[in-house]
Image (tube, rainbow, N blue to C red):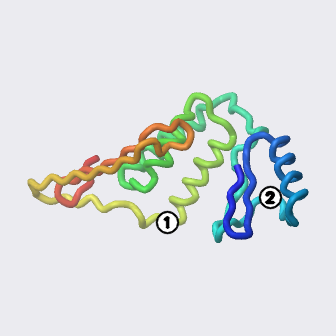
C-alpha cells in the first residue's frame, strides 16, 4: 500500500520483498529520500508494534489471571478501564509476557490517577437512566462490534 499526500509517501505492507521492490521502482522513476522507519506522517506520531515475535507464552498464567481478576473488580468504579481490561481478559488462558506488561501498565495508570473513580452515593431515588454506544466492526483483531453501556440508578452507577 502506498499512501500519498502532496510530496510525502508512506509505503507499508506485510511482504518485505514487495516493499523493497516498490521502493526500488519508485526510486528509478523519481528522486526519493528514504527516511527509514515511520515516526511521523501527516503530523501523527507512530510507535512500533509492542507485541514482538520474541514474546513468549507464560507457562503459569495464574499470576496474570489473579491480576486480571483484580482489574475486572476495579472496573466497577473505573469504567474508563473497561475496554482495556476486557481486551486483556481475552488472553487469560494463553497469556504472553506482553499481556502482563500491558496489564501492569494499567495498574501504573490507576496508581498515578487515583481520583478518577466514580462516586457511588447512597440516596433514595426512583430514576433509572441507561446509555449505550456501539461501533460496528471496531475491534482491530477480531473485526467484531464493540458495544458499551452505562446504567445509573439515581446518581449511582449500577452497571
Residue at horizontal 42 percent and vertical 40 percent from the top: 145
Q: Nearer the viewer, mark 1 or mark 2?
A: 2
Res. 19 visible in picture: yes
Residue at horizontal 65 percent and vertical 71 percent from the top: 43
What x and y, as percent, mark residue 140?
A: 55, 43
Disc 1 marks which residue?
A: 113
Return the mark for residue 18.
none
Res. 70 visible in picture: no
Dot 1 alpha-carbon crowd within 10 angstroms: few under 14, some 14 to 19, many 20 or more: few
> In this view of the protein, which residue sits in the foreground, 8 or 105?
8
Q: Quadrant of residue 98?
A: top right
Q: Residue furthest front?
A: 29
Residue at horizontal 65 percent and vertical 48 percent from the top: 101
Mark 1 or mark 2: which comes first in sequence?
2
Measured in 3D between alpha carbons, the distance from the residue under mark 1 to the one under mark 2, in whole angstroms, is 33 Å
Disc 2 marks which residue?
A: 37
Residue at horizontal 55 percent and vertical 54 percent from the top: 107
Task: Give the left or right position of residue 158, taking residue 115 as reference.
Answer: left
Task: Decide: is 159 above or below 30.
Answer: above
Dot 2 alpha-carbon crowd within 10 angstroms: few under 14, some 14 to 19, many 20 or more: few
Task: Decide: is 116 above or below 151.
Answer: below
> In this view of the protein, which residue sits in the foreground, 141 or 68?
141
Check disc 1 and report its element: helix, strand or loop.
Answer: loop
> In this view of the protein, which residue sits in the foreground, 29 or 152?
29
Amino acid at each position: 500500500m502506498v499512501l500519498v499526500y502532496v510530496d510525502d509517501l508512506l509505503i507499508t505492507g506485510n511482504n518485505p520483498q514487495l516493499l523493497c521492490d516498490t521502493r526500488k521502482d519508485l526510486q528509478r522513476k523519481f528522486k526519493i529520500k528514504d527516511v527509514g522507519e515511520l515516526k511521523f506522517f501527516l503530523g501523527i506520531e507512530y510507535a512500533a508494534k509492542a507485541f514482538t515475535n520474541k514474546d513468549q507464552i507464560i507457562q503459569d498464567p495464574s499470576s496474570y489471571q489473579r491480576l486480571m481478576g483484580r482489574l475486572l473488580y476495579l472496573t466497577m468504579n473505573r469504567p474508563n478501564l473497561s475496554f482495556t481490561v476486557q481486551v486483556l481478559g481475552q488472553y487469560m488462558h494463553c497469556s504472553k509476557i506482553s499481556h502482563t506488561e500491558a496489564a501492569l501498565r494499567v495498574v501504573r495508570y490507576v496508581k498515578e490517577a487515583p481520583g478518577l473513580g466514580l462516586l457511588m452515593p447512597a440516596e433514595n431515588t426512583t430514576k433509572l437512566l441507561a446509555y449505550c454506544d456501539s461501533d460496528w466492526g471496531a475491534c482491530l483483531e477480531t473485526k467484531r462490534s464493540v458495544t458499551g453501556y452505562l446504567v445509573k440508578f439515581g446518581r449511582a452507577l449500577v452497571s
